[in-house]
Image: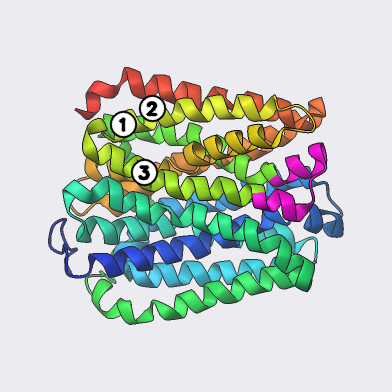
Amino acid sequence: MTTPQHGERRDDDALLVLVATTTVQALASMAVTIVPVLGPQIAPELGVSPLALGYYVSLLYGAAIVSGTLGGDLVLRHGPIRVSQASLVGAVLGLLLLASGVPWLAPVSAALMGLSYGPTTPASSHMLALSTRPERMNLVFSIKQTGVPLGGMLAGLLGPSLANLLGWRGALVTVALAALACALLVQPLRRRHDAARAPDHHIGIAALTGLVSTLRNSATLRTLALASLCFTVVQLSFMTYLVTYLHEAFGYSLVAAGLWMSLGHVAGVVGRIVWGMIADRGLGAVRMVVILAIGMALGNVALGLLPPPPPGAALMAVVVLLGACSLGWNGTFLSEVARQAPPGGAGRATSAILTCTYGGVVVGPPAFALLAGATGSYGVGFVALAIAPALAAVLLYRRRALFN
């Protein structure tokens, strides 16, 4: 069975595809983010320090490397809707395992959540690349990628309140039920959007070597892969530790700290759309991403140097800057990945990039935990994070001619 090529579908169902992929991304993101948001409550009951959240997140995204790497091939074999449904069901099971409160099930939960989360982006990129006009790619991919900060915003906004009402276990179960409902709601889309699946498509070592070849044969994709590693070091450390930082270093309640986290994610939602529009109107995706990398570096330094207690206006400015940049780069970035991919190969190219992207997640939060633990200061950890996006900005700027 043949795979549909780029350009076969455009306006007929583009809006429906965008809504479906954004919703799936939001629920998957909420499932992942709710754990660090409620970390200060979960960690003591599991008998660990809140800094251990970094290791949970690292294990989660380590597993996501495996499934994300194979995500493009899973999409070709099973179809993007079935892969999205399986991802949501896996998140449900992961949340329920953690909600059991059994300490040794926590790493099992992290691994299952990661295996479920990895394929969501290749699945959505595959669908959008086939349904989106080229001149709208930056904006449409940016809108879809608002699902990630939107899910984080919902986790920060609703998570602490749900925990106060139902306990942290009840909060996790509530998010699990929402993810399960989403998996059921997208079922009517499967007949059309999974019609071109190839059940005999091979997944194995050959698929992995194919992804290596994708990066080896494209200097632009290699450059984007390295930059994404740097960006996710910042993104996931910010998402993992902002609530704990505000709670432990500055004495904010979990509800108040969750609201600040939500503000950062709101900025990420708005940023992804605005950055996509600016990139589409002449600046270009690569130049836009370089500017965002500089914003990440400056925002992390500013967050780490905030005095206790931080002035409200200063904290707001820093959280908005970091949210808009460190949570807002993905949509414009992924549109460039799809643009650099061969026809019909956006899912596979995205999977190849995600191998490096999730590598940054595996390294970032644990490194932050080690540095913050050794120095006794979350602020030092945030200042040190500025190194990663600064390196990415230099790399992209020096190799900008490759993308022209």
Residue segment shown in magenta: 243-259
Are the residues at dot 2 and dot 1 in contact (C-beta closer than 8 Å)?
yes
Estimate how packed mark 2 is, as few (under 14), some (14 to 19) or many (20 or more) residues with alpha carbons within 10 Å: many
Depth check: give the residue in front, 358 or 217.
Answer: 358
Q: Residue at point 76% right, 53% down?
A: 254
Left or right: 29, with 41 as reference point: left
Decide if residue 70 is in sight here: no
Question: Would you say residue 355 is visible in this rendering?
Answer: yes
Q: Which residue is mark 2?
A: 290
| Residue 134 sits above or below residue 3 on the image | above
- Is residue 346 part of the magenta span, yes or no? no
Measuring from the top left, give residue 248's x and y in whole percent: 81, 41
Q: Position of residue 109 (x, y in %)?
A: 66, 62
Residue holding disc 1: 286
Q: Is residue 83 above or below residue 397?
A: below
Report which residue position mark 3 lands on: 274
Tag 1 secondary structure: helix
Residue 217's quadrant in the figure? top left
**For discs 1 and 3, the disc positioned in front in the rendered view:** 3
Describe residue 256's horizontal placement relative to residue 15 as left or right. right
